[in-house]
Image (spheres, helix red, strand yellow):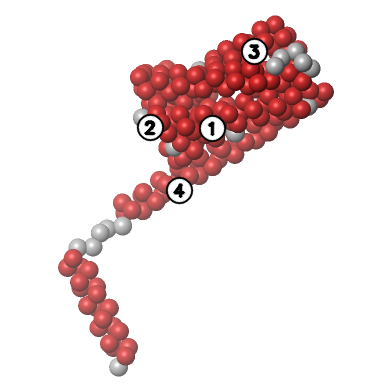
Amino acid sequence: MSESIFNAVTAYGVWGVVISAFLSCLLVPIPTSLMMLAAGALAAAGDLAPLPLIAGAFTGAVLGDQAGYALGRRAGPPVLAWLNRSATRRKVISRAEKMVDAHGGMGVFFSTWLFAPLGPYVNIVSGATRLSWLRFSLADIAGEAIWVNAYVWIGYAFAANIAEISQMMSDIIGILVAGAVGLAALSWAIAALRAQRALTVPAMSPAQSSSLTSETVKAQDALAE
């Protein structure tokens, strides 16, 4: 973990983590997860109070997610068009869209903590696709509670080995994001295949159905004889 992250948390305290959590949910590239690990380690040393830290980080994250959802709700198409100018972001947005389309509120829930790098994009996509605000909010609140508590308490518990823990967590997140992308793509492909099959199977008219039933009965009678 970079010494600059420790210095930032030491200098700005809980408010630094709150602002970081808020901005990172709006696509600002801030390593909030690492800041929470560092803050947890500082809490273990007695430099920060754990409960105000958790409450502040949670509030900042939820407010940031709500802002992202509102942005997508009010100006989704132009915002997504602007983000899609970047090839890298275009791929991430595609993954976020597949996650929301396939899993709805559960996609939001997992994007806040298990697949956190997708979270800010999922917020905007959720608003743009008119996912229910209540459904979004309930999933978001539950997920952020897990995200904040997990990182703060891991930092608190492993303060003596915070550098190794932060590297391990970064590696795990990378693996999980790759897994999420694969699952979302698989779910989308299965849904598309089912929809295609439903369209290609012709519906029988009543006359055809009656004729088929009659032929089946005749065949059964012939076998019986």
Report if the CB atoms under discs 3 and 4 are less than 8 Å apart. Answer: no
Camera-near label (2 vs 3) is: 3
Q: Which sits earlier in the primary sequence, circle 2 or circle 3? A: 3
Q: Which mark is residue 132?
A: 2
Of the pair 172 and 61, the residue shown nearer to us: 61
Amino acid type shown at disc 2: Ser
- Element under disc 2: loop
Image quadrant where one finds the C terminus: bottom left
Q: Which mark is residue 142?
A: 1
Q: Residues within 10 Å of mark 3 (few under 14, many from 20)?
A: many
Residue position for label 4: 190
Q: Is residue 152 left or right of residue 110?
A: right
Task: Identify the residue at the far top of this view.
Answer: 11
Q: Which sits earlier in the primary sequence, circle 1 or circle 2? A: 2
Residue position for label 3: 14
Camera-near label (3 vs 4) is: 3
Q: Disc 1 and disc 2: Cα gap in Å?
A: 16 Å
Report if the CB atoms under discs 2 and 3 are less than 8 Å apart. Answer: no
Q: Disc 2 and disc 3: Cα gap in Å?
A: 32 Å
Q: Which sits earlier in the primary sequence, circle 4 or circle 2? A: 2
Q: Disc 3 and disc 4: Cα gap in Å?
A: 45 Å
- Element under disc 4: helix
- Element under disc 1: helix
Image quadrant where one finds the N terminus: top right
Q: Disc 1 and disc 4: Cα gap in Å?
A: 28 Å
Q: Disc 4 and disc 2: Cα gap in Å?
A: 24 Å
Residue pictured at 22% horizontal, 68% vertical:
209
Amino acid type shown at disc 1: Ala
Q: Which sits earlier in the primary sequence, circle 1 or circle 4? A: 1
- Element under disc 3: helix
Q: Is residue 123 left or right of residue 55?
A: left
Q: Which sits earlier in the primary sequence, circle 3 or circle 4? A: 3
